[in-house]
Amino acid sequence: MLEIHYAHTLMLARQGIIPQAVALRCITALDGLDREQIRQVVYDGACEDLFFYVEEALEKACGPENAGRMHTARSRNDIAITLYRLRLRTEILECVGALAATRRVFLNLAEQHVTTLMPAYTHTQPAQPITFAHYLLACIELLGRDEHRLQAAFATVNRSPMGACAISTTGFPIDRTYTAELLGFEGLQLNSYGAIAATDYLTETCGALSVAMVNLGRIAQDFLLWSTAEFGYLRLSNAWVQISSIMPQKRNPVPLEHIRVLASKSLAQAQGVFTCLHNTPFGDINDAEDDLQPLLLHATADALRAIRLMGGVMADCEINTSRMSERAHSDFLTVTELADTLVRREQISFRDAHHLVSDAVRALEGNYSAEGMVDAVLKAKPLRTSREELLQALDPRYFVNIRTVPGGPAPEAVRSALGDAEVHLAATEHWLQLQAERQQAYPKKIRTDCELLRATWGSPL
């Protein structure tokens, strides 16, 4: 709020709407406010809200005849929406930063496991061999899309409503662009009616956050299952497990449970924003203001905790590569490639090859072995393809290595995708750096312009 006061007062002075000497008195009064005291004050009903509380403090500091000039060509309406946008853009940047940091953890982990075999699952059942890096790349791409959606929401949020006043602007010759620049906005929320009435800056953020939390929860669910003794793929370090008060052997991977519930809470709160705004009038309404805003801030706070927990857990975990490989070598996971080999070598249709391999699977009655599969196929039909070629088709390493198409699990395809992911992540990190510089620069711009005013007029009378 005080940054808005500074920016608006500087603009009024620059435009000649108020005398520069009056502006300097107001700025000096702003400088003298006890910010910590304002943060600590408890609402007692003496003033309607924080705006009037601060205005009263400024009147005491520089006189009502000066403080009252600060409110020329503005309203609590455009001030409030500007406040919300200033705060929300900080929340979005923190969420994007946390996602980028977690994506960096996943990327580093993937680079260590380009050749680590594991099963891919469909319908929660083992399906085909892939690598752990291939799985992580899917997560990395997912988190990257979450970042991009939040970056798009940031672009919507980071537009200045100042100058819209109550809803129809003003007859004073204000400079909205200068005020926006002083507050670090990237442009104007141009139409004054929409600047006050539109709430899509909230719902777009909530939509992006909701998608991110659904994605994060699904990854957490996988990792939680992988931490079970039955799977045994993932082991959290001692720093990330909870012990039992009664069972000495327990190592409970509770951070993953916390991620899941925090993501669900954030999702619910973000969806609550939609519910509160649904079927409200397109105008200035309290439904989008003080009662609603905390819901969104709680959603971003829980999202941040969940994202940061995920990064912390995965940066410090152990991967049971031998267990993953063991599972990749079992459960008939490579028989699709056996069918593909028959198509290539025997020149038969895939449907015929599928039937032949399917009959062999049924013949083994769940007792998988590569030798047994080959015996069953050869028993059903004489083939030109050698036994060695059939056995090679059932090797999980061979299965992975020949899937070289873009996006596949073969090492060369994975390394190419890792390179692309590094480029995309670097772009996000660069964007974050630019936005951080902008956030650091605009308060300095306010102080610089205040000093220029002071240099012109000296100490206030």
Image (cartoon, rainbow, N blue to C red):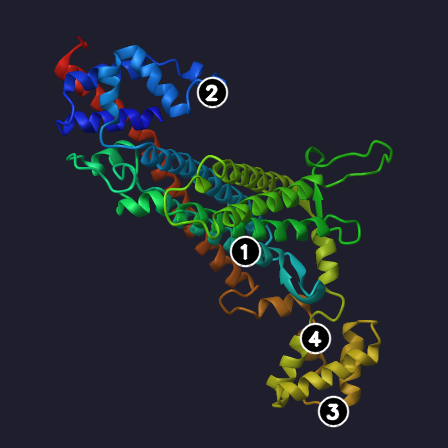
Task: Work out whether 430 lies above or below 352.
Answer: above
Specify whether 84 is left or right of 452.
Answer: right
Residue under label 4? 335
Q: Nearer the viewer, mark 2 or mark 1?
A: 2
Which of the two discs, 4 and 1, labels the residue nearer the N terminus? 1
Label ID, residue 45: 2
Specify whether 23 is left or right of 262.
Answer: left
For badge 2, the amino acid type reads Gly
Residue under label 1? 137
Tag 4, which secondary structure? Answer: helix
Q: Quadrant of residue 56?
A: top left
Say whether residue 177 is visible: yes
Circle 3 packing at 10 Å, graded few (<14), some (14-19), many (20+), is few
For badge 3, the amino acid type reads Pro
Q: Nearer the viewer, mark 3 or mark 1?
A: 1
Distance from Cα at disc 4 to Cα at disc 1: 24 Å
